[in-house]
Image (cartoon, helix red, strand yellow):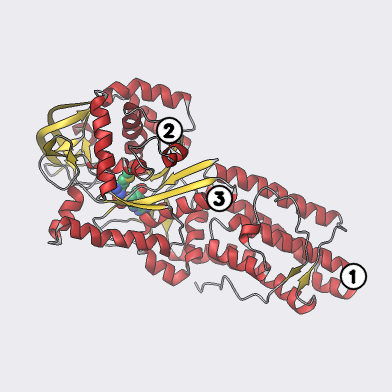
């Protein structure tokens, strides 16, 4: 099966922060998980470089917009690597291939009579790059603001419109008949009630600034940044060449987005696509927002969390783990340093790390660094192996439904049960009383360590690979297909080095 997954493309008006890192890591986790399922994965991310917001930031920095976005885009591209994410394409909306693709989409919409020229008058928020109705705004000291506190300005200009109103009924019936297209469920209901409240035609071009893709055949207009930006998902797989193998293979995509940009992805985007005779997205998943020690993250508060800084402080896998174990994917979460140490110490140091450390060290010291297959299982052994299979099934179900936190929790529960099994079976005592039984117990534990590492690999790839390397197993030898089979060869164990040192609180 093929699996095309995308992050939103990030505005190049500032440097990356934890919110950007969060979406990118989420996609990496789902992408790695799908690779382990042997799906053919295509993972796309990139930068959103046009529009008034970016133009304004460039002006404030007193730098030519193209030079400005060249400078800022690099930071996002570098971050992908730093987060340990394996992508297939990094797209920039100022690239030639994208301009060609966005203009082709525009032309297709014109050809299908989905666009007309008229005049727009209304409120616009540059910060959100979005139009607002007056009833969506609040008035403070005579000025209007959005729900999130963004200032709005009154815009009055000639504009091209997309016939969004024509898509209202079609979108409602599409989502009512395909309830798996938006997740989590509450977001589907939100989108449906927004659509049902009535869709107006959407202004999709601007004339009052220049930093955008020119509208074909009318250079007075640049495209509204959202039609430009959304189109990136098509550009990467070769649009407008919809017959090209890559396009035929991968479209439609799974879009992972923050809850703030769900409307653009779940209302405008499927309408644009259907209006251009293309399939709507395979799925749109909206995640929540992070606050910092209880406070909303904002430029004005200057409390943005720098991903480089926290990775430097706690370690990459520790941060990847914390972000996806701590908060159910889809919910809002609060980032706090004490929560990171508590979580990492409890799950990674005391549970996974401790199991690995004590068992591998024991084998190196007492079993000449070797483990051999065994099948002389007693009831306790069969019970823990049953847990292994049960937790594995749970894990697959959860991960297939983007419930990453629950998937991780299943593995951690299995590791806790295994630590208790170790305590009860006490291989150090068996060494004196029953050597053959000791070997069986160690063989079972090694199997659980290997399989748990495989399940944790999408979340903490570096550490999981390191653990496997102590056991001389290559991650590429493993997959979920033969998960139920135990390892049938002798294993040589290397002396382990610590993987998750406890964090001082
Ligand atoms: N350029 C648009 C997306 C276009 S996609 C065709 C955009 N860019 S953004 O840089 O402002 O935001 C990108 C993503 O970061 C969004 O999904 C947003 O939800 C996410 N986050 C920004 N701040 C965040 C938090 N504090 N917490 C979690 N995610 C947040 O929107």
Residue 244 position by quadrant = top left
**Residue hosting label 2:** 188
Residue 161 position by quadrant = top left
Q: Are marks 3 and 1 in contact (CB under 8 Å)?
A: no
Query: Helix or strand or loop: what does disc 1 sit on?
Result: loop
Horizontal and vertical percent position of residue 399: 56, 46
Horizontal and vertical percent position of residue 181: 46, 33
Whether residue 125 is visible, yes or no, is yes
Query: Would you place residue 181 above or below residue 334 in this image?
Result: above
Q: On the picture, is 102 further left or further right than 190? A: left
Which of pointers 3 and 1 lies earlier in the amino acid sequence?
Answer: 3
Q: Is mark 2 within 8 Å of ligand 1?
A: no
**Residue hosting label 3:** 35
Q: Which is closer to the viewer, label 2 or label 3? A: 3
Horizontal and vertical percent position of residue 277: 35, 27
- Residue at position x 12%, y 61% in the image: 62
How far is disc 3 from disc 1 in space, using C-alphas? 42 Å
- Residue at position x 33%, y 59% in the image: 76
**Residue hosting label 1:** 434
Residue at the right extreme, as displayed:
433
Which of pointers 2 and 3 lies earlier in the amino acid sequence?
Answer: 3
Q: On the picture, is 78 further left or further right than 444? A: left
Whether residue 300 is visible, yes or no, is no
Query: Helix or strand or loop: what does disc 2 sit on?
Result: helix
Q: Is mark 3 within 8 Å of ligand 1?
A: no
Horizontal and vertical percent position of residue 497: 61, 76
- Residue at position x 9%, y 34% in the image: 157
């Amino acid at each position: 099966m093929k699996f095309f997954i995308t992050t939103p493309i990030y505005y190049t008006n500032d440097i990356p922060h934890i919110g950007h890192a969060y979406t990118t890591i989420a996609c990496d986790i789902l992408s790695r998980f799908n690779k382990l399922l042997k799906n053919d994965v295509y993972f796309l991310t990139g930068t959103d470089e046009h529009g008034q917001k970016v133009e304004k930031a460039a002006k404030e920095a007193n730098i030519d917009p193209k030079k400005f976005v060249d400078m800022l885009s690099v930071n996002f591209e570098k971050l992908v690597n730093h987060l340990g994410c394996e992508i297939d394409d990094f797209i920039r909306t100022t690239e030639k291939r994208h301009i060609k693709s966005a203009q082709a989409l525009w032309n297709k919409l014109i050809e299908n009579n989905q666009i007309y020229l008229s005049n727009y008058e209304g409120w616009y928020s540059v910060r959100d790059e979005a139009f607002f109705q007056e009833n969506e705004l609040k008035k403070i000291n005579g000025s209007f603001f959005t729900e999130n506190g963004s200032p709005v300005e009154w815009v009055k200009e000639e504009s091209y419109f997309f016939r969004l109103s024509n898509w209202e009924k079609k979108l409602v019936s599409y989502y009512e008949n395909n309830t798996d297209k938006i997740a989590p469920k509450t977001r589907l209901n939100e989108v449906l009630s927004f659509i049902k409240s009535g869709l107006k035609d959407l202004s999709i071009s601007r004339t009052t600034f220049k930093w955008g893709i020119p509208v074909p055949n009318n250079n007075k207009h640049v495209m509204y940044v959202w039609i430009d930006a959304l189109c990136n998902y098509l550009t990467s797989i070769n649009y407008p060449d919809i017959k090209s193998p890559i396009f035929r293979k991968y479209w439609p995509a799974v879009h992972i987005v923050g809850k703030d940009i769900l409307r653009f992805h779940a209302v405008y985007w499927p309408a644009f696509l259907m209006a251009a005779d293309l399939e709507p997205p395979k799925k749109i998943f909206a995640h929540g927002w992070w606050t910092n020690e209880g406070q909303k993250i904002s430029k004005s508060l200057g409390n943005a969390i720098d991903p480089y800084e926290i990775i430097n402080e706690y370690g990459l896998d520790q941060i990847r783990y914390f972000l996806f174990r701590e908060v159910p994917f889809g919910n809002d979460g609060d980032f706090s340093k004490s929560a990171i140490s508590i979580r990492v110490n409890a799950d990674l140091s005391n549970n996974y790390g401790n199991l690995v450390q004590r068992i591998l060290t024991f084998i190196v010291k007492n079993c000449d660094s070797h483990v051999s297959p065994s099948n002389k299982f007693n009831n306790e052994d069969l019970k823990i192996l049953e847990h292994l299979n049960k937790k594995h099934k749970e894990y697959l179900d959860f991960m297939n439904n983007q419930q990453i936190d629950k998937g991780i929790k299943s593995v951690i529960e299995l590791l806790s049960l295994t630590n208790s099994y170790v305590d009860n079976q006490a291989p150090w005592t068996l060494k004196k009383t029953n050597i053959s039984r000791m070997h069986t117990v160690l063989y079972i534990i090694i199997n659980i360590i290997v399989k748990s590492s495989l399940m944790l690999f999408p979340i903490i790839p570096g550490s999981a690979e390191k653990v496997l390397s102590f056991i001389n197993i290559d991650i590429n030898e493993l997959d979920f297909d033969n998960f139920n089979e135990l390892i049938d060869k002798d294993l040589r164990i290397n002396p382990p080095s610590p993987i998750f040192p406890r964090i001082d609180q």
